């Protein structure tokens, strides 16, 4: 039999590989085991920091693969893949802004662990890991919309961009999830890519991959029809979270010709 193509899998975490409410991933264990036996890279992709990501990667036995952190602002596990500008460069640039603009932005770096814990609902230890930034700075904007426009153009002069995501305004040097994904594809010499996600911030990743899976999440509005969905390049799961993830990955591995129980050398 012809060898199946070199597949690399990208996956969102919350609501996708992790249950929306309990954060459990065990319902996806059988597909994860099959991927591990085939040595197919599983690249976790999320807004989490490297510190938060490493805890999860170790728990799932994925610590030897790269991961995309801070919404694409950084990649862990690929030493040469990261922007030359660091978090401390970002903080220095932020402090060079005019005082009235700077004061209206309260970033994680300006907050105590307790403040971050209150704001995010994370327990203190987890808040500590969320505060350990590598490449981007989430924060709260307390100024007017007009001042925000000035803030954004002052940031642009420092090569920084600001993105709204939920309640936070996140500053970064501009690398997106799609950029980070391309970096990983190149580094791992992927021939075919599979991406899984549940929310609008994953849809570009799903559309950019060769195959995409929208994992059902009953806590979110039904996603619109995505590019490639009519042609069957993107599918939707019936089961939510890790159970849907498990079904979809098994189905796709079967379709691509990876036999059940097959290992890389088997
Ligand atoms: Mg999600």
Image: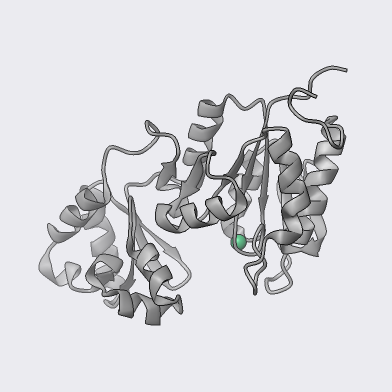
Q: Is residue 250 left or right of residue 140?
A: right
Q: Quadrant of residue 74?
A: top left
Residue 242 at x, y percent in the picture: 72, 60
In the rendered structure, the answer to whether residue 202 lies left or right of residue 137 reads: right
Q: Quadrant of ligand 1?
A: bottom right
* Residue occupying the point 43% across, 73% down: 167
Q: Nearer the viewer, residue 201 or 114?
A: 114
Say whether residue 23 is left or right of residue 30: left
Residue at screen point 78% across, 58% down:
244
Q: Residue furthest top?
A: 2
Residue 104 visible: yes
Above or below residue 90? Residue 19 is below
Residue 141 coordinates in the image, percent (x, y): 31, 73
The residue under the point 67% across, 59% down is 16
Displayed quadrant of residue 38: top right
Q: Is residue 12 above or below residue 9?
A: below
């Amino acid at each position: 039999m012809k060898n199946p193509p070199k597949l690399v899998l990208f996956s969102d975490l919350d609501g996708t590989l992790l249950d929306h409410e309990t954060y459990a991933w065990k319902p996806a264990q059988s597909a994860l085991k099959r991927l591990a036996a085939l040595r197919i890279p599983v690249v976790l992709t999320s807004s989490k920091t490297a510190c938060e990501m490493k805890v999860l990667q170790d728990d799932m036995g994925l610590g030897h693969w790269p991961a995309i952190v801070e919404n694409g602002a950084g990649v862990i596990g690929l030493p040469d893949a990261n922007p030359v500008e660091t978090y401390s460069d970002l903080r220095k640039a932020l402090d060079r802004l005019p005082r009235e603009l700077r004061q209206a932005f309260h970033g994680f770096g300006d907050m105590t662990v307790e403040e971050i814990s209150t704001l995010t609902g994370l327990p203190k230890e987890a808040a500590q890991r969320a505060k350990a930034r590598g490449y981007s700075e989430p924060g709260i904007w307390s100024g007017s919309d007009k001042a925000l426009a000035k803030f954004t153009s002052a940031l642009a002069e420092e090569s920084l961009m600001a993105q709204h995501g939920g309640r936070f305004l996140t500053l970064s040097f501009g690398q997106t999830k799609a950029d980070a994904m391309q970096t990983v594809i190149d580094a791992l010499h992927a021939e075919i890519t599979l991406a899984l996600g549940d929310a609008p911030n994953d849809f570009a990743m799903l559309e950019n991959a060769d195959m995409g899976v929208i994992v059902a999440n009953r806590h979110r509005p039904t996603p619109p029809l995505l590019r490639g969905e009519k042609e069957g390049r993107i599918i939707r799961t019936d089961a939510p979270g890790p159970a849907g993830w498990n079904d979809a990955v098994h189905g796709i591995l079967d379709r691509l010709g990876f036999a059940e129980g097959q290992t890389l050398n088997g």
